[in-house]
Image (tube, helix red, strand yellow):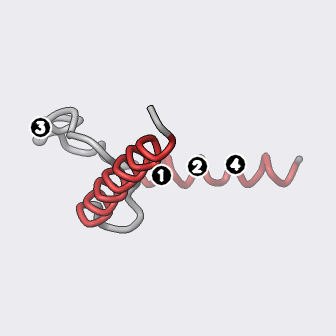
Amino acid sequence: MTAIVEIEKDKRSKAELEKELDEALEATFPASDPVSIGEATSDEPDRPVDRRPPNIDKRLVDKLAKEVARKKGAA
């Protein structure tokens, strides 16, 4: 393969990569999401849709916060 043909091949692959990156950037929202080139791995959510978050026990949270504050003060 000649150098000119190799350069043309590199240009095409770079152009294709740029196109894929542009499409991925357009499809990525919000901007904090990582850019992803390729197909989705699954149409299913990572967790069941009907799963509810756990109930938060405020007293336990307050107790743990005090314990952490006490340990940080001792350190």
Q: Nearer the viewer, residue 27 or 46?
A: 27
Q: What residue does disc 2 label? A: 63
Q: CA distance from mark 3 to mark 4?
A: 41 Å
Report the Cα–Cα distance between label 4 and label 2: 9 Å
Q: Earlier in the sequence, mark 3 or mark 4?
A: 3
Please say if the residues under marks 2 and 3 sit with CB atoms less than 8 Å apart. Answer: no
| SS under mark 1 | helix
Q: Which of the marked residues, 3 or 1, is nearer the chain's N terminus?
A: 3
Q: Position of residue 65 (x, y in %)?
A: 62, 53
Q: Secondary structure at mark 4?
A: helix
Decide: few, some or many residues near mark 1? Use Cα within 10 Å; few <14, some 14-19, many ≥20: few
Residue at 69% x, 47% y is 67
Q: Out of 65 and 28, give the one closest to the viewer.
A: 28
**Do tag 4 and tag 2 residues touch (Cβ < 8 Å)?**
no
- Dots 2, 1 in contact, CB < 8 A: yes
Nearer the observer: mark 3 or 4; the answer is: 3
List the residue tagged with mark 1.
Answer: 59
Marks 3 and 1: which is nearer the front?
3
Q: Quadrant of residue 41?
A: top left
> What secondary structure is found at the residue carrying circle 2?
helix
Q: Quadrant of residue 15?
A: bottom left
Location of mark 3 (residue):
43
Three-letter amino acid code of the residue under disc 1: Arg
Q: Mark 2 or mark 3, which is nearer to you? A: 3
10 Å neighbourhood of mark 2: few (<14), some, or many (≥20)? few
Give the image location of residue 6, x and y in percent.
Answer: 45, 41
4 or 2: tag closer to the N-terminus: 2
Which residue, given by chain and number where applicable, does mark 4 sit on?
68
Judging depth in this view, the residue of 6 and 17 nearest the camera is 6
Q: Choose mark 4 or mark 2, whichever is in front.
A: 4
Judged from this view, the residue extending furthest toward the front is 2
- Specify the amino acid type for callout 2: Lys
